Image (tube, coloured by chain):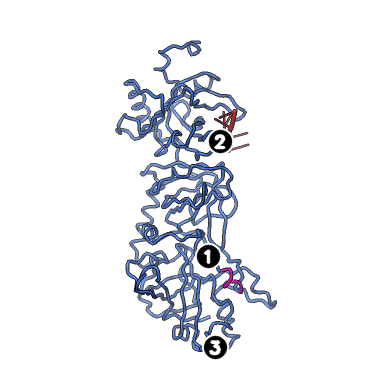
Chain colours: A blue, B red
Amino acid sequence: MSNLKSDDNDDYKFLRIIDAMASINQKVNLIGVITEIGISKQSRGTDCCCTIKIVDESNASSGISVNFFAENFEKLPHVESAGDIIQLVRVVMKSHRSGVNVLFDKKFSSFAIYEGREGSKFSPYQVSSKFHGRDQDKKFIAGLRKWTVSHRPETASNDFLSLKDIKQGNQSTLICKVLHVCEVKDGEWLLFVWDGTDAPPVNIHTKLDEEFDNPLPLQLESIPLSRNVLCKFPTVGTVLRMTNGNCNEKLGLHLLKPGKWVQFKNINFEVRYGLWCGILLSKSKFSFLPDDDDHAIHCRRTYEEQAESKWDRKPFTCLPWPSKVTDTDHQDVPFVTLMDVLTYPEVIAKFRCVVRVVATLPGHPRDFKAPCGTYRIRLTLEDPTARIHAYIYAEDGVKFFWGYPSIDAMIKKHNALLGVEETDDADSDEKPRNPPWVECCLCSYNIDETDVWGSIRYRIFDTTLVG
DNA sequence: TTGGGG
């Protein structure tokens, strides 16, 4: 067995994956195409670790897992795109209940990662310490690149969800673009991802009479994103928040770079305060997809079509038209999304939107009037892109409620607006609400000349609650 | 040492 000897010639030999699998406990050299990248995490020992999956011609479908350990996250492989090529020198083949896998031993193994695209350069974009490139490597890399052109390794799963199809609970795969990443607490990350589709509306369970002390939040992050960040987000389609907050392990999520299309595997979805939230688990995986990934291209194209069609910025589930619960003047004005509203470049502006009213403050119509007798209400509006507070004041309230109806009539209108089921029992506040899509006119303005953007407010006008 | 399938 030549590989038990310290034979320099062995360094020039790459084994096919299928042959390496028969070389248990031996040091081998491998070269393969990366199809999957596990999230880096802190190991239970002293190291950081991650697992990637590679394929080659001998094992094109299932591939083999390679486990890396390193003293810190920086020393682990940072794969820029699924489909890239990794060269592994002196790694150990290990047998395990789950089959054979590869161990990268930091004492003597080394790696180099190359772009996978045919025609790209032969210098690696990341090398481990101890790696020494050789001229002969080029031949193998060129060979693998050529192979991937005709046998595109399956990097993106066919069994993935769009945000428009998400459901609570079951683990699934999501293909999406990372828009923004931030660390909210030590080791706790919030990712903002998007695929151009609208996540489905969900029932609201909060109690309206608790809205003052415990208001329905506008977003899941305790510190709202800055206007600068928000303005870089697309204005059509849901921006989903994803968190590793319930995962005990420390995950290397700083490696997720905004702008990349990513496939997340084994993630969960939850609803928090009526907002969808993606949940990263320790067994979640992600892989960056190449920019020309078919699905990414499809999402981009759909988005561009929607963004161009100025008349169709209605939520995906609002078909064919919003409910007739409200009516607006200015029927000729096209609908925009709440993200359009939040990112509009001028402070003073007018908009027409399709929204759900998910909460009101005060929670009961008996309190809708200020002591002076004029209307004063705060609505929490949402569409698939954002939530905002919008106020109804004075004359706009008279228009909205058709004057000053009786309290019974007001309660009926309020229930219709908030999607509260009318029941005989007094506890209708306990029931989840399912607000209908309604249209409204909004105007924006500032209340402080010294802090124009920080003091921006939204008001409802020229809108009538038909009931 | 650590982790590793579906």
Hey, what amino acid is under mark 3?
A: Pro
Q: Where is residue A171 in the image (x, y as percent from the top left)?
A: 57, 47
Q: Which residue is drawn at 59% across and 81% down?
A: A411
Front position among marks 1 and 3: 1
Identify the image quadrant of residue A336. bottom left
Front position among marks 1 and 2: 2
Chain ID at mark 3? A
Q: Is residue A210 magenta?
A: yes
* Disc 3 from disc 2: Cα separation: 65 Å
At mark 1, the secondary structure is: loop
Q: Mark 1 points at which residue?
A: A217
Q: Main secondary structure of the magenta part?
A: loop
In the image, are marks 3 and 2 on the same chain? yes
Hey, what amino acid is under mark 1?
A: Pro
Q: Which residue is drawn at 54% across and 27% down?
A: A101
Q: Position of residue A229 (x, y in %)?
A: 39, 57
